[in-house]
Amino acid sequence: MTATTLWSVTISTIKTDAERVADSLEMLWDPEPTSIALHEDVGAETWTVTAHYRDQPNLENIKRHLSEQNLPNDLQCERLPDVDWVAKSLEHLTPIATDRFFVSGAHHTAQAPAGKIPLTIEAGQAFGTGHHETTLACLRRIEDKLKSQSFHNVLDLGTGTGVLALAIAKLSRRPVMASDIDPIAIDVAKSNARQNALSPLMKFVTATGFQSPILKQSGPYDLIVANILARPLVRLAPDMRQNLSLGGSVLLSGLLSSQEQMVLNAYLACGFRLAGRLQIGDWTTLDLCG
């Protein structure tokens, strides 16, 4: 598999503006970012927003868009070398453990502690290794829900490396559908399913939202997990309602805490109710019932 060329756009500002900048960048579709992250510049009292793009972004459009919202637009753009950045980022990551799972890459030789379910996740060129707060929060909510509930038809929408779909399959031993807009991510998720001996329980499809006939025909689902970005989650609210079985559950993640109300309002308007929420750092995961 060849490395993917990425472009990065970074903006440094105060924390409150950084959250608004991240939210604003999600609204731009020309091109759409593949990921957006915030991190604190230790000792500098500033935060940096980093957006990654597969295609060269139109900087003038971005600057104008931010300026119209009275947001900082002093940005830096860089074409990253042809390196597998996600896999490279894993080189120094240590395994993580939740109540039930021990998630690590094959690059790490540590053995899962007694009582933990091992999940071996290689990033390849897909996002979602379990180390980001949003994925970690989803894993914890999945563990909690499967203690008291049984799900028979599950969809992981925007699966990335497949870590959440594989975790559900491991705990429930039920078939899980996993989709992603990126065919590279689907290839990586399939490889991870084979490495964890879960291929018989998995079905993968490349799809944007619910546009694939396969996803529609396989529904309705009693559990849908979507760890993507806030704006796409808002747009997907009506489709989530249409493809969820009566009384089913939806886990939504990938949203900053400042975006929580916007996403929640969209789902409440479609007839969902809030069953729980989990915040880790600046990120929130919503647990909704249909």
Image: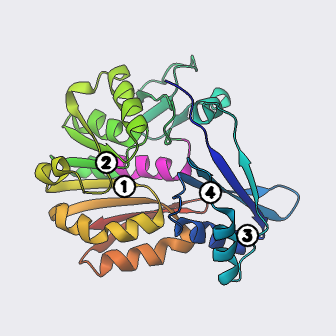
Q: Amino acid at mark 1?
A: Ala
Which of the two labelled residues, at mark 3 and mark 1, occupies the earlier sequence position? Answer: 3
Closer to the camera, 80 or 250? 80
Q: How is the image coloured?
A: rainbow
Looking at the image, is mark 4 or mark 2 earlier in the sequence? 4
Residue 34, compared with residue 66, is above or below; it is: above
SS state under label 2? strand
The residue carrying pointer 4 sits among few (fewer than 14), some (14 to 19) or many (20 or more) residues within 10 Å by Cα, namely: many
Spot occupied by residue 165 in the image (x, y as percentages of width and height): 32, 40
- Look at mark 1 in the image and give the residue it sits on: 226
Residue at (62%, 51%) from the top-left corner?
A: 56
Looking at the image, tell me whether mark 1 or mark 2 is earlier in sequence order. 2
Would residue 202 be counted in the magenta stretch? no
Q: Amino acid at mark 4?
A: Pro
Region rendered in magenta: 131-143
Q: Are marks 1 and 2 in contact (CB under 8 Å)?
A: yes
- Amino acid type at mark 2: Asp
Measured along the vertical axis of the image, is residue 170 above or below residue 152? above
Q: Answer with the quarter of the image where residue 245 lies.
A: bottom left
Residue wearing tag 2: 156
Residue receiving disc 3? 15
- Residue 205, percent across and down? 27, 41
Disc 1, SS: strand
Q: Are marks 1 and 4 in contact (CB under 8 Å)?
A: no
First in sequence: mark 2 or mark 3?
3
Q: Nearer the viewer, mark 1 or mark 4?
A: 4
- From the viewer's perspective, tell me whether residue 199 is left or right of residue 70: left
Q: Secondary structure at mark 4?
A: loop
Task: Provide the residue designation for mark 4.
Answer: 57
Q: Separation of disc 1 and disc 4 at Cα?
A: 26 Å
Q: How far apart are labels 1 and 2 at the CA level?
A: 6 Å
Sequence-wise, the earlier of marks 3 and 4 is 3
